[in-house]
Image: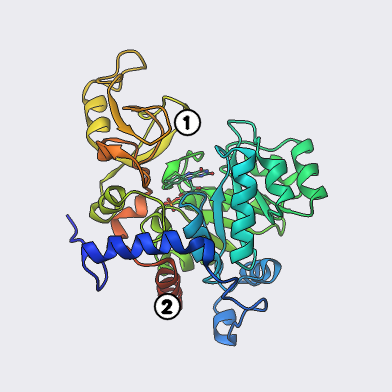
């Protein structure tokens, strides 16, 4: 088991600082990054050609994208640190999506994308575009031509997550600005059925100059370098960014990410009440009891009618819900779906997004 570190601050102070940052989002001064990023020759020299193109295309300082989860404060902090921020809009109302995009736009240089999981209709898409969402990225499906033409008419860019060569070939018919290639090491819902290195090679073979970003288990600057050496233009990080001060994960979830070790995650269909997709989570009590019972189907799962958590204004959360424990939930939070990728074993602390990105780049340069 790993020791828990909270940087130079005590646990109590950490919680207070985290709260202050969250509250401070609405009033954060606009963009702390100049529109033309200050990249030294050395930094650019460390990058492959695909990465250089990616940085120029999106006006980024680093070839690092936040994955969809983490919330508004994290997206703002990542974008203002020279990487690409992200916000998940799949389950937002159109009004909330409009307000969220407007706020992130007003407090950053616009380096963020909105993610939609295509298992449901992207109902807030038009309002997000009206608010000026600069980039829309889809996962778990290929968008239809109508969705793409709405995005293009609004002047926004398009990203698509892929998890195989065939999947990438379908995505490429829509001329995306980038593709995210997900491997099985990923935390959250996992579209992939093979390792990142295998999937990435297949996808790169057909990508024809479209930048491909690698997702799944990328946790350190060394991992980012490995992705670039393999030919990716950049890397996408989900679990690592969930374990930061600004992420909207509940403190109990963050602590579990920090404690997790080498064999802590499972690739499973355990948490499937609202969506029956394969996912990678921490092996917690709910998972272990379901596994011990023989991984039974709905109707026969141990404790499946237990209310294990509540969030103000929402239906109570049942044991096999796909909801992760975010800030504001109360209850048996470590029995909920705590999504985590295989790189979680390398997470030892809860830095700010800015500190993390700085560290990732130093590790990248030194590896
Ligand atoms: C807590 C959590 C929530 C996620 N939610 C989404 C989501 O809403 N949409 C999506 O496309 N991917 C989602 N993912 C998957 C990420 O997009 C990405 O593929 C994954 O985090 C990469 O692997 P890593 O976690 O090892 O970095 C989620 C991942 C995590 C850890």
Percent position of residue 105, x then y: 64, 61
- x, y percentage for residue 35? 67, 76
| Quarter occupied by residue 289 | top left
Number of other residues with Cα within 10 Å of mark 1, as a class: few under 14, some 14 to 19, many 20 or more: some
Residue occupying the far bottom of the picture: 41
Q: Which quadrant: the C terminus?
A: bottom left
Q: Which residue is mark 2?
A: 362
In the displayed structure image, the side of residue 217 where residue 88 appears, left or right:
right
User: Could you tell me which residue is drawn at 36 percent across and 44 percent down?
Assistant: 328
Residue at the disc numbered 1: 277
Q: Secondary structure at mark 1?
A: loop
User: Quarter holding the N terminus?
Assistant: bottom left
Q: Is residue 359 above or below residue 286?
A: below
Q: Residues within 10 Å of mark 2 (few under 14, many from 20)?
A: some
- N-terminal of the pair, mark 1 or mark 2, is 1
Q: Which residue sits at x=74%, y=39%? A: 147
Quadrant for residue 4, please give it.
Answer: bottom left
| Mark 1 C-beta to ligand 1 under 8 Å | no
Disc 1 to disc 2, how far (Cα)?
36 Å
Q: Residue at x 74, y 54 (%)?
A: 156
Q: Looking at the picture, tell me which residue is in the foreground, 319 or 176.
A: 319
- Compared to 334, does 156 lie above or below? below
| Residue 256 image offset from top left, x and y in percent | 26, 49
Q: Taking the image as drawn, is residue 108 in sight?
A: yes
Identify the secondary structure beneath mark 2.
helix
């Amino acid at each position: 088991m790993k020791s828990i570190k909270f940087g130079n601050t005590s646990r109590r102070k950490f919680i207070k600082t985290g709260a202050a940052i969250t509250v401070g989002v609405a009033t954060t001064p606009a963009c702390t990054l100049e529109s033309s990023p200050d990249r030294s020759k050395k930094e650019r020299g460390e990058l492959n050609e695909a990465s250089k193109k990616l940085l120029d295309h999106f006006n980024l300082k680093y070839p690092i994208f936040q994955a969809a989860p983490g919330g508004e404060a994290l997206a703002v902090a990542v974008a203002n640190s020279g990487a690409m921020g992200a916000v998940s809009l799949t389950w937002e109302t159109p009004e909330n999506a409009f307000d969220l995009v407007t706020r992130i736009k007003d407090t950053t240089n616009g380096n963020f994308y909105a993610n939609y999981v295509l298992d449901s209709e992207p109902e807030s898409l038009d309002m997000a575009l009206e608010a000026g969402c600069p980039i829309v990225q889809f996962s778990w499906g290929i968008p239809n031509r109508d969705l793409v033409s709405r995005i293009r008419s609004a002047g926004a860019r398009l990203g698509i997550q892929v998890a195989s060569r065939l999947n990438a070939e379908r995505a490429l018919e829509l001329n995306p600005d980038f593709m995210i290639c997900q491997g099985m090491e990923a935390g959250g819902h996992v579209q992939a059925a093979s390792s990142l290195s295998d999937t990435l090679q297949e996808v790169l073979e057909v990508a024809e100059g479209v930048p491909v970003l690698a997702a799944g288990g990328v946790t350190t600057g060394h991992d980012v370098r490995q992705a670039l050496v393999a030919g990716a233009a950049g890397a996408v990080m989900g679990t690592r960014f969930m374990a930061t001060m600004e992420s909207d994960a509940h403190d109990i979830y963050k602590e579990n990410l920090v404690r997790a070790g080498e064999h802590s995650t499972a690739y499973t269909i355990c948490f499937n009440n609202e969506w029956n997709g394969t996912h990678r989570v921490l092996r917690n009590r709910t998972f272990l009891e379901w596994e011990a019972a023989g991984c039974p189907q709905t109707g026969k799962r141990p404790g499946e009618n237990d209310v294990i958590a509540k969030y103000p204004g929402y239906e109570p959360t049942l044991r096999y819900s796909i909801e992760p424990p975010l800030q504001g939930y109360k209850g048996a939070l470590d029995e909920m779906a705590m999504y985590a990728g295989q790189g979680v074993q390398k997470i030892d602390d809860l830095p700010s997004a800015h500190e993390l990105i700085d560290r990732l780049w130093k590790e990248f340069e030194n590896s």
